[in-house]
């Protein structure tokens, strides 16, 4: 058994047999089932996408995951590719649990929907695990990643997390980990999966480590409170990336207490009764260049609110919508001299924390802008 002539139907059995026979590659044609928790081992490759004649095709194989089944690994390296994993979320253990492991997951999909709330993530990493996820799709009612002291690279992926009505939904939870997110989309948006909206939504909740965003889109919708990125004690670099947050009561595109923060290109948008595009509590200045800020609300509306060191902005646009009275472009201590350069502002009642109305722009520029790069009042570009 386990040959092309007599293939196994169980992926769990195939892994155990491959281990006993010291084989490094498992090929899947058609479909299989994962019915137990099995240990991955060093050098193992699990590869789907074969047809019944054992020729490599452009499609993926299907693996049905029995509840509470999954993969474990402590040490070594492995690769999983070209598989559609389908199952019901577990209430006891992740689908993939890694410790001090190097794992690559390529061209796979993960569909795990259930009606019972669970805080167990699909993938959990720890102890300097290095995880690479490429060209994958995740559709899950449970959180997708729980990252602890790991290095994770996510490229060309789509993550959709619905959460549960009345609860808190977080797609990625990270502690002391380095995360690279490239050409990917993360959506905490139950409408994508036909489900009820969670009370609180966050795409990424991370503390410690580093975050790199390149050409990625993060979107979150919640009934009460939505935060696109919630970051503490991290070094953050973002290029040409967008964050959108929308909620009934309060929305923030980014909330950060960062040890370094730089964002070039892209958009930060927040919509709710109260809304802020960027909330900073950092001891170092956040730096923005060519970023489009947009806030929409009827209550407390602020483009950028800072409780620590004021940020630095150059060639950015900032727009307030929604009819709020008292909307502020900046809220917090006064920015430094020459720290706000060439920015375009529209729709705000105050340029700074109850001071500097729009007709006082000249005085505002004398305090905070370079003489050669004044800020201007303008109308927003109509979005398609």
Image: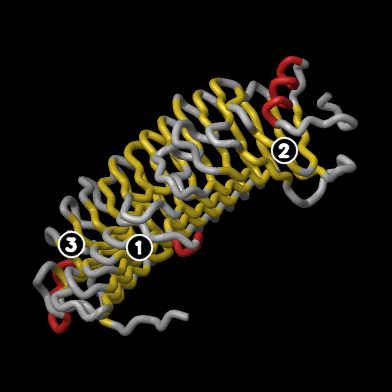
Judge from the rendering whether residue 196 lies leftward or rightward of residue 375; answer left or right.
right
Return the residue nearer the eye: 312 or 138. Answer: 138
* 64 vs 368: above or below: above
Q: Pointer 2: what residue? A: 32
Name the residue rendered at 50%, 29% in the picture. Answer: 129
Residue at image mark 3? 337
Does 211 appear above or below 225? above
Closest to the camera, between mark 2 and mark 1, is 2
Residue 86 in view here: yes
Q: Earlier in the sequence, mark 2 or mark 1?
A: 2
Q: Residue at x 74, y 42 (%)?
A: 31
Q: Residue at x 21, y 75 (%)?
A: 298
Farthest residue in the front direction? 115
Question: Going 45% across and 49% down the picture, which residue do you hit?
Answer: 115
- Label 1 and label 3: CA atoms lie apart by 31 Å
Q: Sequence-wise, which precedes: disc 1 or disc 3?
A: 1
Q: Residues within 10 Å of mark 2 (few under 14, many from 20)?
A: many
Label 1 belongs to which residue? 245
Label 2 and label 1: CA atoms lie apart by 39 Å
């Amino acid at each position: 058994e386990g040959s092309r002539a007599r293939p196994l139907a169980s992926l769990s059995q195939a892994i155990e047999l491959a281990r006993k026979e010291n084989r490094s590659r498992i090929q899947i044609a058609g479909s299989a089932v994962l019915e137990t928790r099995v240990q991955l081992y060093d050098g193992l490759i699990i590869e789907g996408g074969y047809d019944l004649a054992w020729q490599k095709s452009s499609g993926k194989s299907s693996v049905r995951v029995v509840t509470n089944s999954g993969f474990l690994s402590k040490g070594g390296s492995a690769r999983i590719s070209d598989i559609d994993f389908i199952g019901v979320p577990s209430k006891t253990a992740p689908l993939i649990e890694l410790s001090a492991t190097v794992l690559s997951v390529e061209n796979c999909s993960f569909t795990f929907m259930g009606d019972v709330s669970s805080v167990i993530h699909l993938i959990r990493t720890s102890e300097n695990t290095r995880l690479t996820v490429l060209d994958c799709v995740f559709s899950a009612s449970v959180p997708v990643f729980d990252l602890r002291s790991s290095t994770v690279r996510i490229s060309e992926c789509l993550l959709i997390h619905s959460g549960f009505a009345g609860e808190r939904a977080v797609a990625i939870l990270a502690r002391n980990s380095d995360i690279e997110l490239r050409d990917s989309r993360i959506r905490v948006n139950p409408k994508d999966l036909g489900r009820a909206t969670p009370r609180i939504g966050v795409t990424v909740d991370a503390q410690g480590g580093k975050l790199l965003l390149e050409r990625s889109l993060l979107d979150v919708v919640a009934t009460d409170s939505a935060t696109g990125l919630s970051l503490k004690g991290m070094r953050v670099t973002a290029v040409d990336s967008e964050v959108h947050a929308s909620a009934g009561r309060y929305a923030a595109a980014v909330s950060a207490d960062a040890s370094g923060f730089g964002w070039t290109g892209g958009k930060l948008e927040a919509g709710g009764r109260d809304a802020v595009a960027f909330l900073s509590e950092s001891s170092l200045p956040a730096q923005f260049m060519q970023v489009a800020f947009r806030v929409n609300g009827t209550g407390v509306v602020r483009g950028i609110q800072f409780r620590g060191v004021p940020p630095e902005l150059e060639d950015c646009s900032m727009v307030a919508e929604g009819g709020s009275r008292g909307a502020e472009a900046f809220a917090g201590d006064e920015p430094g001299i020459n720290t706000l350069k060439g920015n375009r502002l529209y729709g705000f009642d105050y340029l700074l924390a109850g001071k500097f109305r729009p007709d006082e722009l000249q005085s505002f520029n004398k305090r905070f802008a370079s003489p050669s790069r004044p800020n201007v009042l303008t109308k927003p570009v109509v979005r398609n």
